[in-house]
Image (spheres, rainbow, N blue to C red):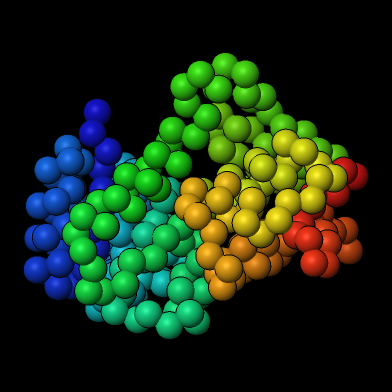
Amino acid sequence: MAYRILVADDETEIRDVLRLYLEKEGYEVVEAADGMEAAKLIKQEKIDLAILDIMMPGLDGYRVLRNAREESNLPVIMLSAKSSDSDKILGLDLGADDYITKPFVPLEAVARVKSNLRRFYALGAGEDKAAEEPVLQVGDLRLETDACLLYRGGEKIELTSVEFRIMKLLMENPGRVYTKQQIFEAGWGESYMVSDNNVMVCISKLRAKLDCSGKSYISTIRGLGYRLEKE
């Protein structure tokens, strides 16, 4: 069955171009011309990946993303003419998986859709899946890799697809120090850029979700990287 992609943008031309290129790749495309419609589709329909423009009437893309993250961890790509680091960081901090800046090359957008779908839905597929542990347990943290769910004690912790992949990396080897490059390449599946601060933002977000009662799960090892504490 084809993946269903939501394209939410108030510009008809943008939606038409993305629909054309995505349907050529065999994806099913649904459209929304404003944020309210996008939020409704995410809530009521089976959407496998969403492309959200930031500046939409009704609800902006950030609000749609925030609402979506309350119920789902589907891959979300933000689409915007805003290219500043602060805008990208805000989107990532709210749970976005990727960011495309306008104007964009349609083939690049398709490549990013493919990459995010592959990382999210095909994680652990193929020969390695049989050998993969279905459940990773570190202290009171429990990661169900097949269902992509994390629990702290009995409480479910909502994760984005990038956060899930980073937690999986850390929980596979608790106590091991991972560099920013290793974490970035595991989380985003792309080559690391020295100036990229996505890792710092994502680790900060994970800490906000995990840490409670003064307990810290992820430690910063100055000059080296990060590690998940064993206990």
Q: Give the left or right position of residue 128, taking residue 83 as reference.
A: right
Residue 228: where, in percent of width, then height? 79, 49
Please tell me in which quadrant of the rendered image residue 23 appears. Answer: top left
Residue 52: where, in percent of width, then height? 31, 64
Q: Quadrant of the C terminus?
A: top right
Number of marks present in the image shown = 0
- Residue in the picture at 50% in, 55% down: 191
- Residue in the picture at 51% in, 61% down: 95
- The foreground one among 5 and 72 is 5
Residue 188: where, in percent of width, then height? 50, 52
Image vertical order of residue 162 relative to residue 28, above or below: below
Image vertical order of residue 197 relative to residue 139, above or below: below
Q: Quadrant of the N terminus?
A: top left
Image vertical order of residue 151 relative to residue 227, above or below: above
Residue 160: where, in percent of width, then height? 53, 52
Can see residue 223? yes
- Residue in the picture at 65% in, 67% down: 200
Image vertical order of residue 228 relative to residue 101, above or below: above
